[in-house]
Image: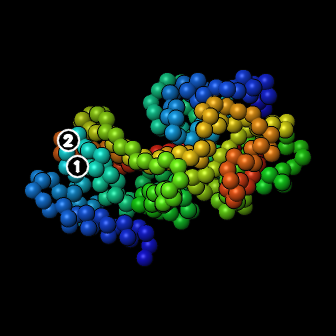
Amino acid sequence: MRTDAVLAGVVAAFVLASCGPAPVQTTPPQAGAAVRIRTNPPSAKDIIDLAIASSQVDLSASPSCQNVGTEPSDRTVGRYLAGFLAELSKSEGQNWIETSAEKGRGNDNAPIWVCRMMIHHVQGDDRWSWGIRFDVRQSDGTLLPGSLTCLGGG
Amino acid sequence: MIAASQLNGFLGKSIGQICSIGYAAPGDNHCAHFVCHVLGYQFGFTCRDMKNGPGTPANIRVQQVFARCPQVGTWASRPSNVTGCLIFITNASNVHIASRTMDNVPRKHVGIFLDGNIWHYSNSQSRVVKQTPSEFSHHYRSPDNAMFYGTMP
């Protein structure tokens, strides 16, 4: 089974398991419903949840995502992030996931959260950080379509 | 072509002293970032895409720089008349010379080769250093230390 298919399954499991008392539900974008954060401002868990829910987004959605996959055949955000997460499977070095949410303004001047999730690795000169940024509308906690940017360098 | 004296002026400097944009996160890889500020490469994904700030931005991705080199090849195949170029180090399987592409793998690095020396950004030391090709070849452990040249975009 392909990894992105597995990731999609994980997302579906997250959704099925999220039927608690919270007023907002998170659903994957392919289900047609808006993806929403659960807390305002978004928590680290919210940001990672949205990143996972964006796994099926095609890397062609943003010029910043062109050729960011660790393999030329990588086509989705899920494959891109999975490629770098897989590098953390060794116990060497320091590995961490960094999230942040900063206040900003959308194209319509509406207040947004500018969210980031970065995967970090440091082991001597072997150091890198790759991840994504996306915008979340503050008024309803939904992810703004087309706001995805692939971040990282080196 | 940049001169060795100009490159020597960067020795010992941190990326924070080089990038006016202010993108200088210590945990990030600034090898392409340094090379592109020095050589003025503003194409593709730049430091301003990571952080908003004043001044001139520069590309920060090794694979985008490699793809812009007019001529690339293994380090051993570098023509003798190419005395100034870019030098890349990574696993050989990540480099596709015929298509002039490099995969976006974690362990890849770039520096500026000129007249027998290499100026590059040591992320572990957080400063610009100068090394010989032999010293540079130990930047990563085998098999991630295959070296390639690329003529300057």
- Residue, x 45% and y 33% (percent of image)? B51
- According to the image, label 1 marks what residue? A37
In the rendered image, residue A128, in percent from the top left (x then y), is placed at: 53, 46
In the rendered image, residue B69, in percent from the top left (x then y), is placed at: 71, 47
The residue nearer to you, when weighing B28 against B55, is B28
Residue A40 — which label?
2
B99 vs B115: above or below: below
The residue nearer to you, when weighing A86 against B86, is A86
- Which subunit holds the residue at mark 2? A
B13 vs A54: above or below: above
> Which structural element holds mark 1?
loop
B107 vs B36: above or below: below
Work out which residue is located at the far front of the displayed protein and give it. A91
- Residue, x 29% and y 34% (percent of image)? A103
In the rendered image, residue A114, in percent from the top left (x then y), is placed at: 33, 39
The residue nearer to you, when weighing A113 against B26, is B26
Quadrant of the image containing the N terminus of chain A: bottom left
Work out which residue is located at the far right of the displayed protein and give it. B80
The residue nearer to you, when weighing B130 against A139, is B130
Q: Please give left or right for residue B16 compared with residue B13 in the image.
A: left
Count the numbered circles shown: 2
Label 2–label 1 contact, CB within 8 A: yes
Counting other residues with Cα less than 10 Å from the Cα at mark 2, is it few (<14), some (14-19), or many (20 or more)? few
- Residue A100: quadrant of the picture: top left
From this viewpoint, is residue B72 visible? no
Counting other residues with Cα less than 10 Å from the Cα at mark 1, is it few (<14), some (14-19), or many (20 or more)? many
Amino acid under disc 1: Ile
Quadrant of the image containing the C terminus of chain A: top right
- Which subunit holds the residue at mark 1? A
> Which structural element holds mark 2?
loop
